[in-house]
């Protein structure tokens, strides 16, 4: 089923610097993103990539045009409504890992869950452990503060944190911009894994062709406009994970889904949402059996 979760309609963004000077950062962008995509956005410096990502993330509003998320036009939402929407539906991973320096890895992942109040404290702790397993951070590192983690490890924590409240989509701006080649590959494997095995939607801005290669779709932006055919489909690379690693991650995934299910039932979620989670559980169980 092709479910569109983000739709931009003729989005323009003008920054007014002085009365005389205006910057046209986006000049009419139409974009639809479906659930399960790993969308890559490339383009020269200053072409409007970050501006576009900020608008998709509702961190910034367009000067004109509409922003529709999960079927709801959020263009005129107020800041409270937007903050809630971001907390519940959007995960963010930036170039500078932006972890809270005084909290451990696991506390950093728990933090947004405790803020949103969707999970109990026990569930938040359990989910944080499972998410760190899913992104492949070794258990020995879970109690470290960010300063005692490498860049690649910090970025894994940032990804786990972005997934904390089970977002509809995750936005990444140059996620490997500060990483060496080896750490980049590890982080990319994690993103690919989450996309392929979990169906997690990602939108990734990058200059790095290796990052671009893992996408399911690639769009180019130049001077505030999306260029050419946005439909380029790229093959997905196979993952470099061992069978044990896959099993461990799938089992963590399954436990995450079970917590999701009990949280949804407790909150009297719509039956559509409950059905969806149950379907994911049976798909994951099937994958585990198939190993
Ligand atoms: N807050 C702002 N105020 C004024 N102009 C801005 C602001 N943010 C971005 N711009 C301008 O808008 C244009 C697009 O910027 P944006 O940051 O979206 O580019 P980018 O594609 O992300 O570039 P890079 O690859 O260097 O990160 C640039 O000309 C930039 O100078
Ligand atoms: Mg940028």
Image (spheres, rainbow, N blue to C red):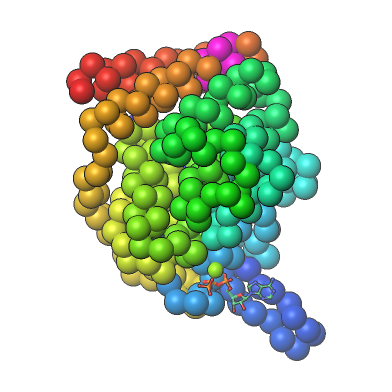
Range covered by the magenta-colored residues:
260-265
Which quarter of the figure is the N terminus placed in?
top left
Task: Tell me, yes or no, if residue 111 can be seen here.
Answer: yes
Task: Tell me, yes or no, if residue 172 can be seen here.
Answer: no
Residue 193: percent from left, percent from top: 34, 40
101 or 204, nearer to the observer: 101
Name the residue: 71% across, 25% down: 117
Which quarter of the figure is the C terminus placed in?
top left
The quarter of the image that holds ligand 1 is bottom right
Relative to 195, is 79 on the left or the right? right
Residue 38: percent from left, percent from top: 38, 48
Overall secondary structure of the magenta section = helix
247 or 257, nearer to the observer: 247
280 shown above or below 95: above
Residue 239: percent from left, percent from top: 25, 43
61 shown above or below 145: below
Name the outermost residue toward the bottom.
20
156 or 231, nearer to the observer: 156
63 shown above or below 249: below
Name the residue: 37% across, 67% down: 208
Q: Quadrant of residue 24?
A: bottom right
165 shown above or below 273: below
Residue 13: percent from left, percent from top: 63, 68
Relative to 155, is 105 on the left or the right? right
Relative to 132, is 144 on the left or the right? right
Q: How many marks?
A: 0
Name the residue: 60% across, 19% down: 123
Relative to 188, is 16 on the left or the right? right
Report if residue 261 lies within the magenta region.
yes
142 or 170, nearer to the observer: 142
Q: Quadrant of residue 162?
A: top right
Name the residue: 55% across, 46% down: 158
């Amino acid at each position: 089923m092709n479910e569109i979760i983000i739709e931009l309609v003729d989005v323009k963004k003008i920054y007014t610097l002085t009365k005389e000077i205006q910057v046209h950062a986006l000049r009419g962008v139409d974009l639809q993103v479906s659930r399960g995509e790993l969308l890559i956005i490339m383009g020269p410096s200053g072409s409007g990539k970050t501006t576009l990502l900020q608008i998709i993330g509702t961190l910034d509003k367009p000067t004109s045009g509409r922003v529709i998320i999960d079927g709801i036009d959020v263009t005129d939402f107020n800041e409270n409504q937007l903050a809630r929407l971001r907390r519940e539906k959007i995960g963010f991973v930036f170039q500078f890992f932006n972890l809270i320096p005084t909290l451990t890895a696991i506390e950093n992942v728990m933090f947004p869950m405790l803020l949103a109040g969707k999970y109990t404290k026990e569930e938040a702790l359990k989910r944080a452990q499972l998410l760190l397993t899913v992104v492949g951070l070794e258990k020995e590192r879970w109690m470290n503060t960010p300063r005692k983690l490498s860049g690649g490890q910090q970025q894994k924590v940032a990804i786990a944190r972005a997934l904390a409240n089970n977002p509809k989509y995750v936005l990444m701006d140059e996620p490997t911009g500060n990483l060496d080649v080896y750490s980049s590959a590890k982080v990319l494997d994690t993103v690919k894994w989450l996309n392929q095995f979990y169906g997690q939607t990602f939108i990734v801005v990058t200059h790095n062709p290796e990052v671009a290669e893992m996408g399911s779709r690639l769009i180019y932006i130049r001077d505030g406009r999306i260029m050419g055919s946005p439909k380029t489909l790229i093959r997905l690379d196979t993952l470099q994970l061992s069978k044990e690693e896959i099993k461990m991650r799938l089992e963590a995934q399954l436990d995450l889904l079970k917590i999701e299910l009990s949280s949804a039932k407790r909150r009297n979620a719509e039956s559509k949402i409950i059905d969806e989670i149950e379907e994911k559980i049976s798909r994951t169980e099937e994958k585990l059996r198939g190993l």
